[in-house]
Amino acid sequence: MFWGVKMDLKKKVSLAVVKRLPRYYRYLADLLKMDIKRISSQELSSRMGITASQIRQDLNCFGGFGQQGYGYNVEYLFNEIGNILGMNNNYQAIIIGAGNMGRALANYTNFEKRGFKIIGIFDIDTNLIGTDIRDIPIRHLDELESFISKNYVDIAMLAVPFEQTPAVAERVAKLGVKGLWNYSPMDLKLPYDVIIENVHLSDGLMVLGYKLNEKFDFNRENSNKGNED
Amino acid sequence: MFWGVKMDLKKKVSLAVVKRLPRYYRYLADLLKMDIKRISSQELSSRMGITASQIRQDLNCFGGFGQQGYGYNVEYLFNEIGNILGMNNNYQAIIIGAGNMGRALANYTNFEKRGFKIIGIFDIDTNLIGTDIRDIPIRHLDELESFISKNYVDIAMLAVPFEQTPAVAERVAKLGVKGLWNYSPMDLKLPYDVIIENVHLSDGLMVLGYKLNEKFDFNRENSNKGNED
């Protein structure tokens, strides 16, 4: 396994574009499944609901895979975006916390399709230790150090209670895990050389709330609904 | 309850800015808690890790709450962003699917802090019906129509298995629910006048994968790790 194959592409892409790449990657995967070999920016635009000019601009960041009158080669574009995103690095991840969120993550088979393999789950609840989720055993958190010393762990998915998150995060960072995916509602920061992605579930909900507010205008006071019992 | 109070602000803000607003909102909430009355774009910049010019640009969309030499009035900005996001609409939500993801959502108390109240949970597993999560009873999906006819339901959070998602989504849309928050890994589309936010958990993980790939360069083949059993 080798990291950083795409040296020449490093630093060339803005984070705004990077954040859109997973979406392109998913759509291209669907096209591949449908055996579609090439696609114009117009067709991709109508499928994805992004303007064709945005698509051309985004994909031009990588040196322009599109050809006038031909469109994009779906397989080539899929592979290139996959390379840029590091999908071929065979990242290995552990989940810390086997509560509802941790279990939901462990059951999310799409991570594997995107090149992320979950190799361990940790918790402190002795009732859970020894059980497994999709054949991945749940280990006691005490085994973390020993496990990481024996296995490549690139990413720790943190799904522990809020108060415990900073200490657990520091523990995995000290053990050399470079990527932290934090599901506790806080902007976790650590004085270590690590990448932290903080997931704020409510942010997406707030965007939905904004769109509802923007699109629909109605006055509940005109209705009897909700007045019963 | 009244929707669309901020008529005059409608359509003025780009979606890119809207997507950053929840983050501002969270930081401003923290500042309020610390009893900080005003803040400069520079201070906000160093806290949030966004450039001061980006902050000024984002917040100017709303007519400029900042004053030269004074900075931003934290409470005013917090309230205005809350209004824009529709946080004062007292949105009511239901969760469909009481598996791990649905339960994780039901236990996420931050939604309430952001103005979203979960008023019902639905499932088809008879073992779950009649139990509750944080005092919210789990009802049989058969009761959906009757429940929605008696209660305002603005948002349905869909946490059902992939195959069942389109049918369940159509069912709630037909019942007049205007906001769908979809946790199944698909870009759900419906021929109804609804807002759909599709959550793709793996997208955030792929961005983390990109950042790891960009920052760290190492060759696993030089290590003995992972070669044991």
Image: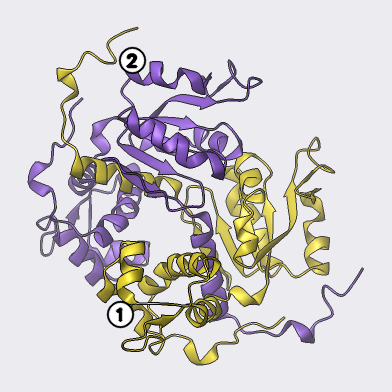
Chain colours: A purple, B yellow
Query: As shown in the figure, which amino acid type bears the numbered disc 2?
Result: Lys
Question: From the viewer's perspective, is residue A190 above or below residue B81?
Answer: above
Q: Is residue B125 visible?
A: yes
The residue that label 2 is drawn on is A150
* Residue at which label 1 appears: B57
Q: Residues within 10 Å of mark 1 (few under 14, many from 20)?
A: few
Both marks 1 and 2 on one chain: no
Q: Label 2 marks which chain's residue?
A: A
Quadrant location of residue A34?
Answer: top left
Which residue type does callout 1 highlight?
Gln
Residue appearing at x 65%, y 76% in the figure: B89
Element carrying mark 1: helix
Separation of marks 1 and 2 at Cα, in angstroms: 48 Å
Evaluate if marks 1 and 2 touch, with contact meaning CB atoms under 8 Å apart: no
Tell me where residue A143 appears, x and y as whole percent: 46, 17
Query: Which quadrant of the figure contains the C terminus of chain A?
Result: bottom right
Q: Which residue is depicted at the point 49% across and 41% down?
A: A165
Report the chain holding disc 1: B
Along the line of sight, which residue is nearer the eye, A222 or A36?
Answer: A222
